[in-house]
Amino acid sequence: MKHENINQSSFGMIGLGTMGSNLLQNIADHGYSCSGYDNDPKKVDTVNKLGNDNIHAFSDIKDFVQNLKSPKIVMMLVPAGKIVDSVIAELLQVMDKGDIIIDGGNSHFTDTEKRFEDLEKKGYHFVGMGVSGGEEGARKGPSMMPGGDKKAYETIKPILEKIAAHVNGAPTVAYMGERSAGHFVKMVHNGIEYALMQLISETYEFMKSGLQMDDKEIHDVFKKWNEGRLKSYLIEITRDIFAYKKKGEDHLFFNDIKDEAKAKGTGKWTSQAAMDLAVPVPMIDIAVSMRDLSKYKELRTEASKLYPDATKSDLKDKTESIEKLEQAFYFSMVSAYAQGMHLLDQANVEFKYNLNLDVIAKIWRGGCIIRSEFLEDIYAAYKNNPKLAHLFLDDSIHKSLVKSIPGIRNVVSEAVLSGIAVPTYSVALSYFDNVRSEEMPANLIQAQRDFFGSHTYELKGKEGVFHTDWEDPNH
Ligand SMILES: NC(=O)C1=CN([C@@H]2O[C@H](COP(=O)(O)OP(=O)(O)OC[C@H]3O[C@@H](n4cnc5c(N)ncnc54)[C@H](OP(=O)(O)O)[C@@H]3O)[C@@H](O)[C@H]2O)C=CC1
Ligand SMILES: O=C(CO)[C@H](O)[C@H](O)COP(=O)(O)O
């Protein structure tokens, strides 16, 4: 479909799928004239049939670009990977130097790093921007994490600030930092998302198998939790999943879903990046691993026959157990955010991104999947002390964390004795117990390394590296 009006649109979107179509409508709702392009003519048709006077969709990339005002602003919301490179290559044929290209997908930060460098050399302004909030967020107000070309960000800032969610009047978008900073921050956001989702699924298992609660009771607990300090988007949707029945059916729909979790990769990328930077994020690691384990259905089925019953403990007092579980969830949730923020802090040093952790917490308070009441505390912690080395060291967080320790210890031990898998809870606790250990047993590891491989060790109170012949009879 060709349009008469050329050079009319203020904003162009490539990829009119779930995110692109909704974000474009959000932008159009704020009074901007928009163009859309997708290589799937059906998507183009669907968008044109919305009847939104502010949106014109094209199935020819040249017509699409021609319809944009200069400097042209084009955002891509296409699947991450090679497709992004091929769309950029097409765009370079039809855009002009000085134009702005935004990648709003979940691109790997190392790809963004290369694209930024390449496009900068070629004279284009490139912004790598994480977008979170899913379909509804894109339509009504996402959280956005732009990084890269600062000048380009200043140009698109008025649009982004209008379409973002708002918390206490502040938009949930801000410039994150240099080059690939936006996509790095989004990746860590997703890593935390994985950890919290795994934590919620273990909570459900503990309630169901440990406390013998039925679906209605579980729904009521999530409802109550969402009215307190655990209030968050993920608890809110879990509450709603525990109330969702198909018309005419008497059971919750999610019970029909296979217990095999899929993943697009951002959680794994977070763990990989954390390993490369030597930052421990064990809750994210375990969340990725448990999604992987869920796929081994046959293996699990066979093993379940071989090892049928674990010792069951007697969890009698449900009310008291739920109170402990709330403490345990709070404790572990704090730990999940703390591990993610620690990774961001260390990546900032390594990659010289110029991140501001308070700003990141601020824009995560609304619009995104990990938005939560607790992000207010994280925001306050980093605003109060931008150099805070770890969230556990913040005074206010310290106070509430300490009060939750009995809960986490109780839940982990009860679960272990009952044979209920709570790896994220367990690792949250062990991570904490090691973080609070001035002495770790790592000296033994050093001794072993030196014993079998002459890898050397350092000594307390003595400079230098040393080696011992551990099997020398004359030592
Ligand atoms: N869905 C979500 O909740 C979220 C997704 N994201 C990220 O946003 C990006 C887009 O996701 P989403 O909207 O869900 O994906 P969809 O698959 O729904 O939409 C992508 C669209 O891009 C089109 N497309 C593919 N290749 C090209 C091309 N070469 N030229 C033009 N259009 C093309 C696709 O067409 P076709 O179908 O024909 O291939 C499709 O219409 C991804 O990086 C995703 O990870 C980020 C946050 C949340
Ligand atoms: O980016 C998102 C939300 O912010 C995606 O919806 C989310 O990452 C989905 O990831 P996965 O498919 O791996 O669970």
Image (tube, grey):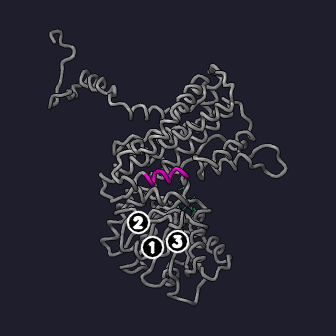
Secondary structure of the residue carrying tag 2 is loop
Q: Which residue is mark 2?
A: 175
Inter-mark Cα distance, 3 to 2: 22 Å
**Screen quadrant of the N terminus:** bottom right
Residue labelled 3 has its Cβ within 8 Å of some atom of ligand 1: yes
Query: Local crowd at mark 3 within 10 Å, few (<14), some, or many (≥20)?
Result: many
Q: Is residue 378 magenta?
A: yes
**Residue pictured at 33% horizontal, 54% vertical:** 348
Inter-mark Cα distance, 1 to 2: 9 Å
Circle on res. 57? none
Q: Which residue is mark 3?
A: 14
Whether residue 456 is visible, yes or no, is no
Q: Which residue is mark 1?
A: 157
Above/below status of 310 relative to 292: above
Magenta stretch in the rendered image: 373-380
Residue 267, how many percent across, how many down? 48, 47
Residue extending farthest top: 473
455 sits to left or right of 195: left
Residue 424, how many percent across, how many down? 52, 36
Residue labelled 2 has its Cβ within 8 Å of some atom of ligand 1: no
351 sits to left or right of 373: left
